[in-house]
Amino acid sequence: MNDEIVKNVTDKLDLALERGKQLIEDEEVQQRIQDLKNVAEETVRKHPIKSIVVGLAVGFLVGKALSGDDE
């Protein structure tokens, strides 16, 4: 029974990894990622102070979420 569960999970992970690999290799996806990168760089250049504040806020929130403190 456990071997069957492990095989099922392994097969699903293999399929997910293959789909992820295909997605990363897709030229259209790569172009979209490059476009998003360009927009982000342009935004940071136009609004450097706001970008720093947003980055700090996001970092703080992610840190709080991952810290596990329930205070």
Image (cartoon, rainbow, N blue to C red):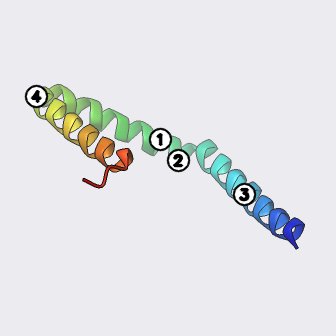
The residue under label 4 is 49
**Relative height, residue 25 to residue 47 (above, below):** below
Give the number of the mark in front: 4 or 3.
3
Q: Which residue is mark 3?
A: 13
User: What residue would you read off at disc 2?
Assistant: 28
Q: Amino acid at mark 3?
A: Leu
Q: Nearer the viewer, residue 63 or 33?
A: 63
Q: Which quarter of the rendered picture does the N terminus lie within?
A: bottom right
Using the numbered discs, state the Cα–Cα distance from disc 4 to disc 3 in whole angstroms.
42 Å
**Count of marks overlaid on the render:** 4
Q: Earlier in the sequence, mark 3 or mark 1?
A: 3
Q: Secondary structure at mark 3?
A: helix
Whether label 1 touches label 2, CB < 8 Å: yes
- Amino acid tagged 4: Ile
**Looking at the rendering, which quadrant does residue 63 occupy?**
top left
- Position above or below: 54 against 6: above
* Secondary element at image label 1: helix
**Residue found at x 29% / y 46%:** 64
Q: Position of residue 30 (x, y in %)?
A: 51, 41
Mark 4 or 1: in front is: 4
Residue with the mark numbered 1:
31
Q: Give the mark nearer the N terminus: 3 vs 2.
A: 3
First in residue order: circle 4 vs circle 3: 3
Disc 3/disc 1 C-alpha distance (Å): 26 Å
